[in-house]
Image (cartoon, rainbow, N blue to C red):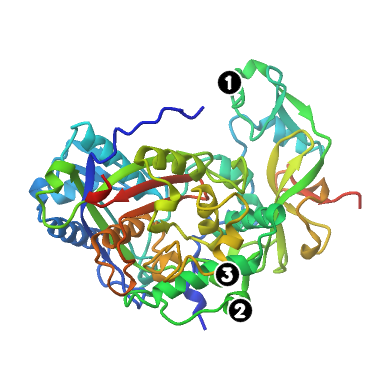
Amino acid sequence: MTAEADTAAAASPAPPPAPAPAPSRMMEPPVGAYSAPFWEATREGVLLVQWCTSCDRGVFYPRSFCPHCGAPASALEWRTASGRATVYAATTEHRPEATGATFSGGLPYVVALVDLEEGVRMLTNVIGCAPEDVRVGMPVSVTWEALSDGRQLPLFTPWPT
Amino acid sequence: MQSERVDRTLRGAAAVVGVADDVSPTGELERTGRDLEVAMILAALDDAGLTLADVDGVCHAESSLALAEYLGIHPTFTDSTMTGGSSYEVHLEHAAAAIAAGVCDVVVSVYASTPRSDRTQKRRVERRFPPGPNPMAEWEWPYAMRMPMGPYALAASRHMHEYGTTSEHLAQIAVSTREWAMRNPRARYQTPLTIDDVLASPMQTSPLHLLDCCLVTDGAGAFVMTSAERARTLRKPPVFVLGASTCHDHMMISQMPDLTTTPGAVSGARAFSMAGVKPSEVNVLMGYDSFTITALLHLEDLGFCAKGEGGPFAADGRLGPGGSLPMNTNGGGLSFTHPGMYGMFLITEAVRQLRGEGEARQVDGAKIAVAHGSGMVLSCMSTAVLGTEETL
């Protein structure tokens, strides 16, 4: 009935153009001003979380001060995360072509928010199971996908597998 | 962190005195850009019985400077606030505050966007993204979340998990909104819609179906505001600002503290407090409906029902014609128009309802209307409580 071309679903703003040559991910993450240690650790498959020693809370995304208590950079350190997390919210992209995603091979894939054991939340893809098996509240653990420059992108997979 | 002060300094100080908008059932407009904006400004000024020479304040979500230069005016109040779809409710709040403070006397805000005809006419459109490394590029874009619907799908998924909200609940919002659109000859969609139609439409970004998503259409509008005193001397009955408030608690969805509660819970409470109005006294709710879940969250966060009860609240058709809470009487972003930043049309419709200009969709005796804008990805909420002269 409804012309699909009428909806936001059909006409969402195009993501920025992919760099050439196209990597497996349409967009590889730039390294932010305060996140170099995070990305360096991913080369070894280590998930780091910035931590405020003043208020004893995790900080994500990495910053130059603590957004919880206002402590300066000197109060921030890097801690190795357990890699375990819980799915907070999840959506399955049923039209991969509309997102420009190439990594899914054209199949539906899951975008999720996961809460790390350390108390911070990050966006990710949940892989290693059928999209319909991903449930809010399910335990997941970190897994890695190679980026073109040797860094790795943290993804999550059901845990225990 | 939020102020506990009950502050009524804006109540009744300023009024919306002119509105205009341009929307077509074809979804496309012939005019574009500044041409369209100027037409809206002149029409809204004419609606008020004012001219460009009266304008000393300008609001525009891209550049109030560029707009004023084009218009050839020299305003003493300027506002280029860009909060996405809620920009126009924020402009209204800022204009009311500036007028109340005596900074300026007549303020105009305008919006024009033609994404649908840009596509069909193959016009080149500049797409701007934040330059250089930014948090979204680093922490969200690599995961190929579909924009703009992905963040709303995540919010819907969490709401379903916590409160048992169903796809049928969400679909009912689209159905009630369509019932209003069927009474609006300018609406893009005017054919009947059922819950089954919504559920049968293609799944996009679960749990959102195609018909849970707003339109993409051309559209434009403008509003004019002035002091309460001057408003009473003009052409149409003034629509007074009783309360207005804005709050934002994130930019990107992965930084939203709680995906089931928007910052509208703050802006709404503050706007109602300033207005001295309770949700039960609202005759028309214009609640930004980029997606069905967006509107559902407004019902809860503005206090029309308890948190988690939005689904059952909407389920009995109370939001449609003849219902106890008429919502999005123009047909909304879901069925009327959605050019990208829809908040302008919340204001133009609220004003028309309070003037009794709602034609076949008029809510009888409407005295209080709320225009509640949502910007970016549930990021910035701005609430305006508007009322007729007798509500002062």
The residue singled out by tag 3 in the image is B171
Mark 1 or 3: the one toward you = 3
- Chain under label 2? B
- Chain under label 3? B
The residue singled out by tag 2 in the image is B196
The residue singled out by tag 1 in the image is A70
Tell me which residue sits at (33%, 65%) in the image: B219
Tell me which residue sits at (77%, 63%) in the image: A131
The span from disc 1 to disc 2 (Cα, nearest Å) is: 51 Å
Residue B71 coordinates in the image, percent (x, y):
15, 51
The span from disc 1 to disc 3 (Cα, nearest Å) is: 43 Å
Tell me which residue sits at (44%, 82%) in the image: B191
Residue B170 coordinates in the image, percent (x, y):
59, 65
User: For the residue marked with disc 1, what is the amino acid?
Assistant: Gly
User: For the residue marked with disc 3, what is the amino acid?
Assistant: Ala
Q: Is residue B241 above or below residue B123?
A: above
Residue A161 coordinates in the image, percent (x, y):
91, 53
Q: Does residue A94 appear in the picture of this structure?
A: yes
Q: Which of A78 and A33 lies nearest the eye of the viewer?
A: A78
User: For the residue marked with disc 2, what is the amino acid?
Assistant: Asp
